Image (tube, rainbow, N blue to C red):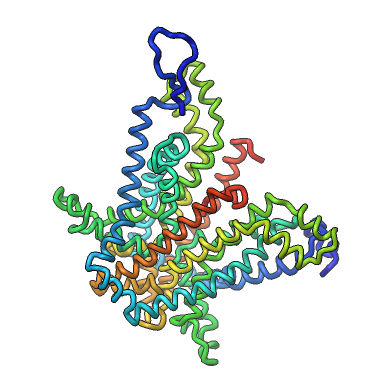
Amino acid sequence: MTDVTHGAPVAAPRAFVSPATERRVVRIVLVLVAIAFLAIFLFLPLISVFYEAFRAGFSAFLRAVTERETASAIRLTLLVAAFSVPANLVFGVAAAWAIAKYEFKGKSLLITLIDLPFSISPVTSGLIYVLMFGAQGYIGPVLADHGIKIIFAVPGIVLATIFVTFPFIARELIPIMQAQGSQDEEAALSLGASGLKTFFRVALPNVKWALLYGVLLCNARAMGEFGAVSVVSGHIRGKTNTMPLQVEILYNEYNYGAAFAVASLLALLALFTLIVKSVLEWRYADEIAATRRH
Amino acid sequence: MARATAFAFRKPSVLPGFGLTLGFAVAYLSLIVLVPLAGLVVKTASMGWPEFWSLATDPRTLAALRLSFGASAAAAAMNAVFGLLVAWVLVRYEFPGKRIIDAMVDLPFALPTAVAGIALTAIYAPNGWIGRYAAEAGVKIAYTPIGIFIALVFIGLPFIVRTVQPVLEDMDREVEEMAATLGANRLQTVVRIVLPTLAPALLTGFALAFARAVGEYGSVIFIAGNIPYVSEIAPLLIVIRLTEFNYAAATAIATVMLALSFVILLAINLLQAWSRRRLGHD
């Protein structure tokens, strides 16, 4: 794109190089170094997951992923995502509405607090729920008296997953809703639409791609969360093992083929997430948040 | 719904639902995040200073913290260099497969950490694709701190690329052209003009990658070898203390890490404010 030839009649016609870019050989070397780095650090691990998963053949792969405890881990992972993603979706929409459409004191504190789970180690995220609901926790014993079990049971896994995926949807929605302002909603209201109708027919459609984007990222993390879930799960086989925990158990039993078979399903989920995410970014760049960090 | 003027702490608006949405958001935030975190603080406070201090300065804890923070800083530094390179190449140059590579940069965000952990271990183990050649050269990667470093480079990379990329895209090329017309060679322009403009974003990305790496668990524990005092990271030590039912020790380590994370988060916010001011936004 920079190889624009000079218009002036020069004796030796030489490709014009813009002074604001590098020489061609430098560019090629930089691109090659970047690709080599990514190949070693990103592509190789991804390829190795599928290579190891199918090393013993497709039938071994099928046997591994349909094995009883693995199937139950897949079901639990889907169940956990089915609880935690909608919970954070409702929160994300409510928080974004309050933050983007109104001016109030303490707003930036609220935004900082919403981002808090991102800066906390997943292990600590699990630990705080153990301290709260564990057998020696603050309210764990009281709940146990009423026959309610949170830690080493499914509710604890759901809670820990909600915690680690807490900011995803809110932080995708807040910037885009802030950028859009509230003229559309005000117009709808002044034309006689009810508050709810305005919300569902005007506000939500305006942010639908950002919403989908947030849900996608939230779901990927919810299904793949390992550290926080590992702390609260108790690793009860066939009961409180999610897919990532099942990967760990199979791996630690030296059952590498099966571990990578389950891992390859999670890697497929990651690839699917990346593809949809990229399509959304290419097609609806203006309608999803300007910031691309997570 | 309450009258708009009833809320002295906000500006009036015709839109309904402020009380409902803010009330729900704050209640949910408190239940899920703030109250459980307060539990951690209360647990630490109830320990008393001498007990907390002796737990936090236990030699094995200190070794784990040193490893976690040291390896994280090293990995973030490596990513600052290569992340900048990747962002640069993606923004400034055209080459085949660019879009796919751009999309793949987010892989570490999307790939579950346990999957990354076992994949990296398979590659860098003494019989793995890369580990094999390293072993021939007499270098052990998996089950040593080098393995931890590699896992942390993997998970930290997107933070740098995605913070630097938008700044680089918005950067005014005319300034570089001007530097060139004024006689600067390309290297001078990059070092004296481009890099200072990118520095705030680069620092922010470094801090984000560092903060993430310090708390990382899933991708590290498989490749680390987990030998106390040598290759045992702080989050793993929390898990070990928990399985021993030593909640006090687990809490103390978590509190130290959390305090450091708060400092980092604060630094990130200050950096972002500073970089916005410098680049003349808002």
Question: At which x and y percent is residue A115?
Answer: 57, 59
**Observer able to see residue B231:** no
Give the vertical position of B98 relative to A211 (above or below): above
Viewport quadrant of the N terminus of chain B:
bottom right
Query: Eyeballing the image, is B137 above or below B237?
Result: above
Q: Nearer the viewer, residue B91 or A107?
A: B91
* Image-quadrant location for residue B58: bottom left
How many numbered marks, from 0 up?
0
Residue B90 lies left or right of residue B122; in this view the side is right
* Whether residue A84 is visible: yes
State the image coordinates of residue B216 (x, y, percent, origin top left): 40, 60
A36 on left or right of B89: left
**Which residue is pictured at 72% across the width and 63% down the height?**
A201
Residue A133 appears at what percent x and percent y?
Answer: 51, 80
Q: Quadrant of residue B69?
A: bottom left
Q: Nearer the viewer, residue A22 or B75?
A: A22
Q: Can you give x and y, in whole percent of width and height, for residue A44 in the image? A: 30, 53
Check the image and name the residue furthest to the top: A11
Left or right of residue A221: residue A290? right
> Which quadrant: the C terminus of chain B?
top right
Picture residue at 43% right of the left edge, 81% below the top: A152
| Vertical arrangement, residue B159 with respect to residue A74, above or below | above
Residue at image position (42%, 49%) is: B105
- The residue at 41%/71% (across/down) is B249
Left or right relative to B241: residue B141: left
